[in-house]
Every structure is written in structure tokens, then in C-alpha cells.
Amino acid sequence: MATTSRRNMLRTLAGGLAGTAALANAGASAAGLLNAPDTTQKEWFDDVFSSGKAVSGGLHLYRFSDEIYALTKPISWIPNPGSARDLRKVEVPAGFITDFASVPKIFWSILPRDGVYVYPAIIHDYMYWMQEAAREQADETLREGMQDFKVDIVSINAIYWGVRAGGGAAWAANAKLRSSGERRVIRRFPEDPLVSWFDWKKDSTVF
């Protein structure tokens, strides 16, 4: 009974967000590399995904006292064959600062910030910070990343349409912070587990 209730809540949330968001997905196209006449889809897939996964690097984290996290080892994500043509490989370096999935606190009981989608959420967080690709590409990467982790479709839709509807403010805020000199990739980690990210970033030598 509890599971059905939660799924119904998520469907309602996803439907509401979808109604307020503009459709940004123009449709997926085949990967350009598959056009090579001497390369079959299976050969290309086996070459790129020799590990059998679109993601690489176990999730190793340092936790600050204010519930902010830093990667202690790099992670990456590679588009699957058939992904939208403009999606690309994303590599997140060790030391990147993240708050996991940006889910409003009211929904944490059904969409926890550290759910199974936390890996693609960090990839998405990094893309929103670096802004080397369009916001739409970052959001689509999040959606495909969640599919790679076999997240249920209701949660995928709720999170995806949530960032489509509300991600613009975070994107703009990140751009402003970067222009003001804010940095989010550290080289040195605290030894004291009680140190907060707010205090640690005040020391310029940690970057």
C-alpha cells in the first residue's frame, strides 16, 4: 500500500512539472561514429563499452559537516549508442564539490538526495557548474544516466521535469558564482570531520 501511494504521488508530481516545462527534447539520433562503413554497431559498442557500462569510476566521497560532499576519485559517463547526437562524454575530477540531487526537502521521503540516481546527479551537478555544454544537454545526460542505473521511470520523469522546470535558476546562480571567483574543485581535504564546506573554501590554498 505504501509503495502504491508513493508512486501515485510521484506520478502527480511528474505530471505537474511536465505541464509547466517546455518540451526541449527534439528526439534522439543515431551516434555519428556508427556511420563508419567498416564499423558495425556491435563492434563500436564493444569498443566503447568494454566494461559493459556507460559509467566509470566507483563513487568515493568526503563528507563536510554541512552535508556537502567532495569526490575523492574521478567518475565519468559515456553516451550510449543511439543517444542524442549532442551528448558527449563527461569526466568529473576528484575534488569536485556536490550536494547530490537537488531535490526539494519536502520530497526527500520519496526522492532522497542520495538515491540510486546520485551518480548521474553528480555528473549533472558538474555540468551545471562548468557550463561547457548547454543546459538542455546536461538535463538529457541526467535522464540517460538515470536510465543506465535502472531508475524507475516515474522517478526519472519527476527528476528530469523538475530540473527542466526549475533548473534555470540554479544554472544562472552558478554562472554568477563562477564569474565572482567561486571554485568547486579542491586539491586538499580536511582531516577534521567537523569542518564545513562553508569554512573550508575560505582557504584559497585548498584549491
Image: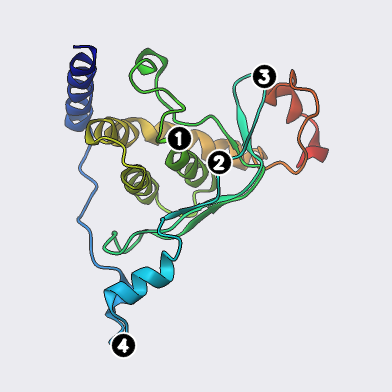
Instruction: State how far apart marks 2 and 4 are (Cα).
Output: 36 Å
Seen at 37% across and 59% down, the residue is 79
Residue identified by numbered label 4: 38
Compared across the picture, whether 137 is left or right of 156 comes to right
Residue 10, horizontal then vertical, whole percent: 23, 22
Q: Nearer the viewer, mark 2 or mark 1?
A: 2
Instruction: State how far apart marks 1 and 4 are (Cα).
Output: 38 Å
Q: Earlier in the sequence, mark 2 or mark 1?
A: 2
Question: Is 176 located above or below residue 9 in the figure?
Answer: below
Which residue type does callout 2 highlight?
Leu
Question: Is 161 located above or below residue 139 in the figure?
Answer: above
Dot 2: what SS? loop
Compared across the picture, whether 21 is left or right of 68 comes to left
Q: Nearer the viewer, mark 3 or mark 2?
A: 2
Quadrant occupied by the N terminus: top left
Q: Give the number of the disc on residue 118.
A: 1
Q: Earlier in the sequence, mark 1 or mark 3?
A: 3
Q: Earlier in the sequence, mark 2 or mark 4?
A: 4
Q: Give the number of the disc on residue 59.
A: 2
Dot 3: what SS? loop
Residue 202, horizontal then vertical, whole percent: 76, 29
